[in-house]
Image: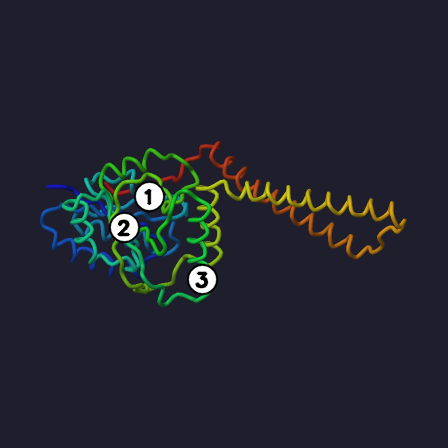
Amino acid sequence: MPLLSLIVPCYNEQETLRPFMKALYAVLDTLPDVQPEVILVNDGSADDTLPLMRELAAEYQGARYISFSRNFGKESAMLAGFQAARGDYVAVMDADLQDPPALLPEMLRAVREEGFDCAGTRRVSRKGEPVIRSFFARAFYQLINVVSHTQLVDGARDYKLLSRKVVDALLQLPEYNRFSKGLYEWVGFRTKWMEFENVERVAGETKWSFWKLFKYSLEGIVAFTTMPLAVASVLGMLCMLVALVIIVSLVVRQMLWHNSVDGWTSLVCIIVLLSGLQLFCVGVLGQYVSKMYLEIKRRPHYIVAEQSE
């Protein structure tokens, strides 16, 4: 009987974890031809998520948990799940029930019977989200698809079901700065996309603030394109050309009319503009250098403090 591993990253999910497990196992009970393995990953939660995981691991057959020594982030939690998963098929889903467990049978069918290597999910609407957050989310997908060869699907969730060979391919990517949405697409393979309406959390509050999402989007852009470096170079060349034209025009004006240009205000504006442009380009370069710095230190992605057998 094939083994289905389900990876569930958790950070302060004490309110959602028990309803999630109940809903998940209600769906798994309808899949008698697979053996389930549920891997709960505690990403350094500050509430009672870990004690609850211990209870659920003892209560539900096939459930086990991994607990980090501190909060390392969702990407590290997913990686830990992939490394611990033994299944022929591996799925990743959130514990807040925004990833409907009812889609699992259809996702499994797509991989087992229809010849796809993975089944992904995407939201067709962002109902319930703040308008500004939805606007910037769509803008991010449009931007990264323009500047990167790795194309992302708008509204794609981390909720995916992968065949074993896709998981093995992902585990060959050892990078420290991980952006899973891009990694899924980078490794390739045939994907069947399943659409669903946005579902609000069953309880609690989202852990993704606007600032965290903004930093995560920068992570994706830096990880999958060098276009910002090219843009910085082009801006630098344009500024040099504009400066050269201005210098030539001023020299000609002085030679013909002996009238030097007055006006410290315009000079200050130009200096501020060019200084800001230089700082912007240095900042773009710094983003790439900082990622290189984190990579070459080769620190572990996470540290496990406790795990079940």
What residue is shown with label 1? 184
Q: Please tell me the numbered disc located at residue 120.
A: 2
Outermost residue, front side: 256
Q: Measured from the top left, where is residue 65 in percent x and y?
A: 27, 46
Instruction: Please report the residue visible at 84 percent of the width from the left and 52 percent of the height from the top.
Output: 261
Disc 1 packing (10 Å; few <14; some 14–19; many ≥20): many
Type of amino acid under label 2: Gly
User: Who's the residue at 20% across and 53% down the image?
Assistant: 104
Residue 172 location, x and y as percent?
Answer: 33, 33
Which quadrant of the figure contains the N terminus? top left
* Sequence-wise first label, 3 or 2: 2
Label 1–label 2 contact, CB within 8 A: yes
Indicate which disc, 3 or 1, sits on the residue closer to the N terminus. 3
* Disc 3 from disc 2: Cα separation: 22 Å
Which residue is identified by label 3? 135
Query: Are discs 3 and 2 less than 8 Å apart at CB?
Result: no
Q: Is residue 295 above or below residue 124?
A: above
Left or right: residue 68 compared with residue 235:
left
Q: Left or right of 155: which side holds 226?
A: right
Q: Amino acid at mark 3?
A: Phe
Give the Cα separation between the discs numbered 1 and 2: 10 Å
